[in-house]
Image: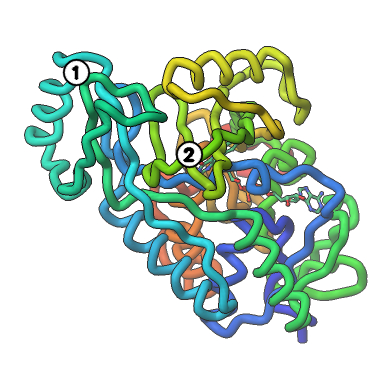
Amino acid sequence: MPDFDYLIVGQGIAGTSLAWHMHAAGHRFLIIDNPGLPSSSHVAAGIFNPLTGRKLVKTWLADQLFPYAVDFYRRVEKILGISCLHYTDIFRPYRSAEEKDNYLRWAAENGYEAYISGRLPDFTANRFIRAPFNGLSITRSGWLDLPHFLDSSRNYFLATGCFREADFSSEDLALDDQHAVWQNMRFKKVISCMGAGAGKDAFFNWLPFNPVKGQILDCRVEGYDVEEIVNQGIFILPLGGGLVRIGATYSWHDLDWENTEDARLYLSEKASGLLKAPFSITGQRAGIRPSSADRRPFAGRHPEYSRLYIFNGLGTKGVTLAPFFAQQLVNLIAYGQELHPEVNIERYFSLYSKPGFS
Ligand SMILES: Cc1cc2nc3c(=O)[nH]c(=O)nc-3n(C[C@H](O)[C@H](O)[C@H](O)COP(=O)(O)OP(=O)(O)OC[C@H]3O[C@@H](n4cnc5c(N)ncnc54)[C@H](O)[C@@H]3O)c2cc1C
């Protein structure tokens, strides 16, 4: 008999979503995390936005992913007795009158009406936000307070004997025909959810990660009362009490977790263009988004070791991607059901060239 069915390595949004799905399905799991290591989920703003980019493109699988994610977070909120999901419209100021016509045409042509809010406040004279052409309000959007969600989940799993603080090294894992053995405990399967730390995971570091560094600022804007998340190149996320979060930067270089002066200046300049009111910076955070080369998650079974799985590559959209694909992965691991082909790491098996694998 194994000690647990599954070992989940990493308690970011990937590992935590997986753990809740295993919990719901009645599987016995242990989730471990080294709190001394950085976590992208603890840096992220947690925003979920169905229409993104300068051209307002509906995000991949939005019609399936968004309702699933909201329902999942609501269910967990109920179990934990907390409130961490904030359903908030996203206001996109138009840059010009022409952009207004384009956005409205795009929305109509592409059937995005369900994602455009009927409630559009007049921002042209707003005392905090510069929006001379007003803007578009996106709905079915908002943000998840990730630290609150993750820390409360961790406490729950700790109290139910399913969580331990520990550092994982692939060298400490033994695989035999029956089990995966780690620290004298036997598991049926091990799922690596190590975020950007997966580069050090000898079993999965052959996957084409494309990590992206990001930074955000915590700021104070006296009397700030805008309820919407404002998004134009950067986002301004209202936290209440005159506090806002401003982000984010994207960098494919200098992939460390350090704050930089460059990022602080860049975000301050962008914020000054969007905000009419003065603001002061109270904090800064940096993290590494675990993105993949084709911008699709990594999920599935190792090409050679059938007891090893991965859930990673959530990139810039961990909050929306994690719940839906955690469910798919649990269905694969426990019941052999097919994964969505665009997330299945089988798409990269040709890159795996360990001796003995064919
Ligand atoms: C500045 C910034 C802003 C962002 N904003 C958003 C946003 O608004 N919305 C959104 O959806 N996404 C956002 N993201 C992306 C989001 O953070 C990621 O998609 C998501 O957090 C990835 O989650 P993860 O669980 O895969 O990785 P992580 O959150 O990094 O979790 C990995 C966990 O594994 C643990 N770990 C790693 N190695 C080991 C080991 N050897 N032993 C034990 N434990 C280990 C780490 O301690 C960590 O807790 C943002 C990211 C950044 C950097």
Viewer-side label of 1, 2: 2
Are the residues at dot 1 and dot 2 in contact (C-beta closer than 8 Å)? no
Nearest the eye: 244 or 355: 244
Q: Quadrant of the N terminus?
A: bottom right
Q: Quadrant of residue 279?
A: top right
Front position in the image: 76 or 339: 76
The spot of residue 126 in percent (x, y) is 32, 31
- Mark 1 and mark 2: span between their CA atoms? 27 Å
Quarter holding residue 39: top right
Front in this rendered view, residue 349 or 40: 40
Amino acid bearing label 2: Tyr
Q: Which mark is residue 224?
A: 2
State left or right for residue 195 relative to residue 142. Answer: right
Query: Which amino acid, by three-letter code, is at mark 1?
Result: Glu
Instruction: Say which mark, if any, is on residue 99.
Output: 1
Q: Residue at x 71, y 68 (%)?
A: 154
Question: Which type of secondary structure does the marked residue at label 2 adopt?
Answer: loop
Mark toward the start of the polypeptide (1 vs 2)? 1
